[in-house]
Amino acid sequence: MNPTLLTTLLGALGGFLGFVLSEMLRGGGGPQETGLSVLWFTAQWTAVLMLPLTLVLAAADNVLGLRGKWWRGLARIFIPALLLGLVSGAFAQAFYSLGLALGAPPRLTRATGWALMGAGVGLVLGLLDRSWANAWRGMLGGAVGGFFGGLVFDSFTGLSLDENDSGVLARLVGLTILGAAIGFMLRLSQELFKTGWLMGTTTGKYEGKQYILNKPAVSIGRSDGNDISLYHDQTVPMQAGTLRRIAGSGQAWHWQSSGETGGVLINGRLVQQAQLRHGDRLRLGSTELLFQEKGKAAPDTPFTQALTLHSNEQATQLPTPFKHLTLGTAGDVRLAGADILPRHAEIEVKNGALMLHALAPLRLNDQPVAAGTRVPLRPGDLLTLGQTDFALLRAELESVGSV
């Protein structure tokens, strides 16, 4: 599922959970009609609403990214989320009362109050990653999401179950939509302003997950103490190394291996340290991470990783290095099988990644690919040419399977 969509749905879940908890607070009786009592009640109500929303979105960051276990850091943000909820709720109520006194439109005033809560959620999530850049972007995204979510919330104030409904349905719908709006804008703000990131490309637990590089140093390893924790991969050292942004080299990112390892594979070459370029691939244990920078093109370098195409009758190793290969009975890689054409498909290297160009109809992972279509290709994919299935595997996996 698309990460932005999933974050939006989880934000809606957080808003719903906040509604449930806040209704428990309201069940204890509403505030007395005095300024301080209303201020204190609103502060509590906002804190109870903000806490589950923040925790759910923090867990979403862990799951969708490379930070580690889904519960990582949740205990650390519990108290800050409550305190910021109290503060933002008190400020929102004070701002709303001041706005009414000055004759400001109530709807816009309330929406601004919700924006304060959204900014608080973004601030806590940014501090979870110990990144001020992430915190500022989170505050911006949360504030925008809270503002527009607050405007929508106000549109549902007339909803009711019956004449005895005290606004429960309106709060349920409104708070759920508010949470979704904050989740959506938090994710969108991080995506819009990111400049560099690592993306998992290995088929498995880390495939498609990313870590946005928002601070000067990012540690990587299997331990939970790292910024990027690859705890699923037991072949990764506890402390593999660190990515550092060096100001003196044009803000370039450099890899430095720790003393615990003999280096890492970058584009198939074992190194202790190296400057990274867009499209470089870091191999740690059995996990591969693709380094990307916004606005930069990967160098036109050949693909160096050893790959094989396996069918039930044959195992064909792809030549290395390569930039372009033709698959077929008369291609660069000669494949035998019923209905395979002389030139059935091509494998190209684009921006450091593999692309499959169908010269004739074929299937990729049991999905049809029309002739003339280009689609991403990764190790672990199942390619069907004619009536023959071929698995694209890393060469090292072949030796493991033959033991």
Image: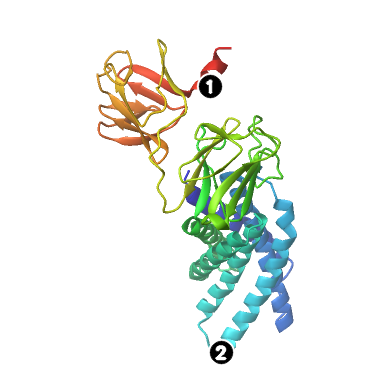
Nearest the eye: 337 or 38? 337
Along the horizontal axis of the image, is 197 left or right of 322? right
Q: Position of residue 32 (x, y in %)?
A: 73, 79
Look at the image and tell me in which quarter the C terminus lies.
top right
For this rendering, which residue is in front, 31 or 141? 141
The x and y percentages for residue 368 are: 32, 30
The residue pinned by badge 1 equals 396
Q: Is residue 165 visible?
A: no
Q: Which residue is mark 2?
A: 102
Looking at the image, which residue is at 58% across and 54% down?
A: 246
Q: Nearer the viewer, residue 296 or 364?
A: 296
Q: Is residue 125 left or right of residue 307?
A: right
Residue found at x 32% / y 13%: 336
Mark 2: give few (<14), some (14-19) or many (20+) Cα within 10 Å: few
The spot of residue 218 in percent (x, y) is 63, 49
Looking at marks 1 and 2 on the same chain, the residue that comes earlier in the sequence is marked by 2
| Residue 189, disc | none
Discs 1, 2 touching: Cβ within 8 Å: no
For image coordinates 71% across by 73% down, the residue present is 41
Residue toward you, 182 or 249: 249
Cα–Cα gap, marks 1 and 2: 71 Å
Which mark lies nearer to you, 1 or 2?
1
Q: Residue furthest front?
A: 248
Q: Check disc 2 and give the amino acid type.
A: Leu
Q: Amino acid at mark 1?
A: Glu
The answer to whether residue 364 of the structure is visible from this angle is yes
In the figure, residue 275 lies in which quadrant?
A: top right
Instruction: Assign a secondary structure to mark 1.
Output: helix
